[in-house]
Image (cartoon, helix red, strand yellow):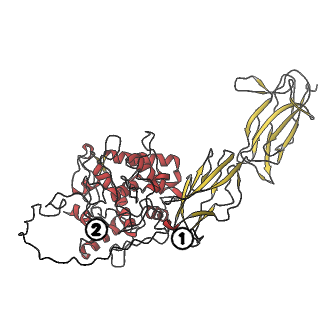
């Protein structure tokens, strides 16, 4: 019984004493970052964190499973290798094989693409547990796709957030409102930009655990968050579902999984029961973990007590009555998003940056009603389009920002990549079909306006020999080091004739052949460029080497080929 104690603590279902004991024990022994109320229990109101906007989350702040992990830590099981848990505590520590594999593959991928994030797979497992009970106990096929859809409740504003349809029902089957989808419970508008192909099948499917786990990892790693830092970890979890109770529950499972877990066969994982919305949520094959399960007439949900049909009351003829007058329910007030008529530029300046630099100007757009009134609390999505490797700060090509009290959404700063040329950033309103705004941006090549040799020694060589010193130059731009600047080195005929010389000093290519022009050179991080070794043919004389860079910097170096003095 001890192993099951924490798992059955359900919000609103347990007594205050039991809830206090369970959370206090978890806080003391498992999750030092759990946030408690002064009474030692989780906040029943699930208050959003003040530093994360409730309208901008991965799940749309949909309901989640509230079951807590067992109070006793998982211990190695003698039969763990066979996938059979060795006790009740170990049953909770077991993660379905395909689901566990997806979490670990996502961790490996993020370790390569965003090493500074320090994403642990146990965090994905904790979120997967809380969001869908590990894909309903691993109810997935061999490719990791859920056998039956996992859908959250209709986000129609009745007891939940109100998010009008953004995907035409593509992911959630609802063309009126959105619903959270899949084992990691992404809402369609978030999946549109955060979706990833985690299993390499060429598709981004929120119902596939490999795709969803990798997408969740990237979502948690945006904004350059370092998840080994407690404050960043807290921000990342709250950005997924903005609730203090949600944060506490995820942290509890994170700490529990860090102390040990094991693989169990798909379809045999432990199913949670308690839901933050008060529904039974048994994790069975219902249309979705947060949707009402279809229950046969006369039966209750699993674990709900008697399954015998209730006796029918005796047939009676009710007296004739006049139906009471009813007032039709008032239509819900339109959300801020539904009042938006158009987008306006909010004073964005010229978007230009040198390759590798951060754009000085940020993109700002304003949402307005038909009358031109600003609309606050509206999500605006900024998407980078075109052949470019420029990204927003944090490494993503898409950013969603909520408008402030003035109706303005300002995108994160653009970080120029190495590809030069023009591209566009498109601003659109999430959940509203209005014309978008396109912002033109340009990345220019790195430049240098001055070149200088790093040594002043004469460059001499005997006929048929090789120059003892290699030519090294330093590039600068407006007095600062010019790194990554493209350069070309050519042995020319004369100061006023930049034609390539056909005699005198030369370089060698990889095959040892003579070359007198080197293109595609680049200065290093310190602005230095060191040329390969120079050789001389049998023709004595004075020759010129010219080095040019993007931006117009030019340096001509004198080379002498002469017999050695007697």
Quadrant containing the N terminus in the rendered view: bottom left
User: Is 455 on the left-hand or right-hand side of 198?
Assistant: right
Residue 377 percent location from the top left of the image: 51, 69
- For disc 1, the neighbor class at 10 Å (few under 14, some 14 to 19, many from 20) is many
Q: Residue at x 15, y 59 (%)?
A: 297
Are the residues tagged 2 and 1 within 8 Å (C-beta)?
A: no
Residue 352 percent location from the top left of the image: 71, 54
Q: Residue furthest left?
A: 314
Residue 41 percent location from the top left of the image: 32, 74
Q: Is residue 24 above or below residue 556?
A: below
Quadrant containing the C terminus in the rendered view: top right
User: Is 404 on the left-hand or right-hand side of 513?
Assistant: left
Residue under circle 2? 278
Between the residue at mark 2 and the residue at mark 1, the CA separation in whole angstroms equals 31 Å
Disc 2 element: loop
Residue under circle 1? 376
Disc 1 element: loop
User: Is 212 on the left-hand or right-hand side of 441?
Assistant: left
Q: Report if residue 61 is visible in the image.
A: yes
Residue 380 percent location from the top left of the image: 54, 61
The foreground one among 119 and 505 is 119
Precedes in sequence: disc 2 or disc 1: 2
Q: Report if residue 469 is visible in the image.
A: no
Say which of marks 2 and 1 sits in front.
1
Q: Residue at x 87, y 20 (%)?
A: 538
Residue 303 falls in which quadrant of the image? bottom left
Residue 420 falls in which quadrant of the image? top right
Q: In this view, does 75 lie above or below 369?
A: above
């Amino acid at each position: 019984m001890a192993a099951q104690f924490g798992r059955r603590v359900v919000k609103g279902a347990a007594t205050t004493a039991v809830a206090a004991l369970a959370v206090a024990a978890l806080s003391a022994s498992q999750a030092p970052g759990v946030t408690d109320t002064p009474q030692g229990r989780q906040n029943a109101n699930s208050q959003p964190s003040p530093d994360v906007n409730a309208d901008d989350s991965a799940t749309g702040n949909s309901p989640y499973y509230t079951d807590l992990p067992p109070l006793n830590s998982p211990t190695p099981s003698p039969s763990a290798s066979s996938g059979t848990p060795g006790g009740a505590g170990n049953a909770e520590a077991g993660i379905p094989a395909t689901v566990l594999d997806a979490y670990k593959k996502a961790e490996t991928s993020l370790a390569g693409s965003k090493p500074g994030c320090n994403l642990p797979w146990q965090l994905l497992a904790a979120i997967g547990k809380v969001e869908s009970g590990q894909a309903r106990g691993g109810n997935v096929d061999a490719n990791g796709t859920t056998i039956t859809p996992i859908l959250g409740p209709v986000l129609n504003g009745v007891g939940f957030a109100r998010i009008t349809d953004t995907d035409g029902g593509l992911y959630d089957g609802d063309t009126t409102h959105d619903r959270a989808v899949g084992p990691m419970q992404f809402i369609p508008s978030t999946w549109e930009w955060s979706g990833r192909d985690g299993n390499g099948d060429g598709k981004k499917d929120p119902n596939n655990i490999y795709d969803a786990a990798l997408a969740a990892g990237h979502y948690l790693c945006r904004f350059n968050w370092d998840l080994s830092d407690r404050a960043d970890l807290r921000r990342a979890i709250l950005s997924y579902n903005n609730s203090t109770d949600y944060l506490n529950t995820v942290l509890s499972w994170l700490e529990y999984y860090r102390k040990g877990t094991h693989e169990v066969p798909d379809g045999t994982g432990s199913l949670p029961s308690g839901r933050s919305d008060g529904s039974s949520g048994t994790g069975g094959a219902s249309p979705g973990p947060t949707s009402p399960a279809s229950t046969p007439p006369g039966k209750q949900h699993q674990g709900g007590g008697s399954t015998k049909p209730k006796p029918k009351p005796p047939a009676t003829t009710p007296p004739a009555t006049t139906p009471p007058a009813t007032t039709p329910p008032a239509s819900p007030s339109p959300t801020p998003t539904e009042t938006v008529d158009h987008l306006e530029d909010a004073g964005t300046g010229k978007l230009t940056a040198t390759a590798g630099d951060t754009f000085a100007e940020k993109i700002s757009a304003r949402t307005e009603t038909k009358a031109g009134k600003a609309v606050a609390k509206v999500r605006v999505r900024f998407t980078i389009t075109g052949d470019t490797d420029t990204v927003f700060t944090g490494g993503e090509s898409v950013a969603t920002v909520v408008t402030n009290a003035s109706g303005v959404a300002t995108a994160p700063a653009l970080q120029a990549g190495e590809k030069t040329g023009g591209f566009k950033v498109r601003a659109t309103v999430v959940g509203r079909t209005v014309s978008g705004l396109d912002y033109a941006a340009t990345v220019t090549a790195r430049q240098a306006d001055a070149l200088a040799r790093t040594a002043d020694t004469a460059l001499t060589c005997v006929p048929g020999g090789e120059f003892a010193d290699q030519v090294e130059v330093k590039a600068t731009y407006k007095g600062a080091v010019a790194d990554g600047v493209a350069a070309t080195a050519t042995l020319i005929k004369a100061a006023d004739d930049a034609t390539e010389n056909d005699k005198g000093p030369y370089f060698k290519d990889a095959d040892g052949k003579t070359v007198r022009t080197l293109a595609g050179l680049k200065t290093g991080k310190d602005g230095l460029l060191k040329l390969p070794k120079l050789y001389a043919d049998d023709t004595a004389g004075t020759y010129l080497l010219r080095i040019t860079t993007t931006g117009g910097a030019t340096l001509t170096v004198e080379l002498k080929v002469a017999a050695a003095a007697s």
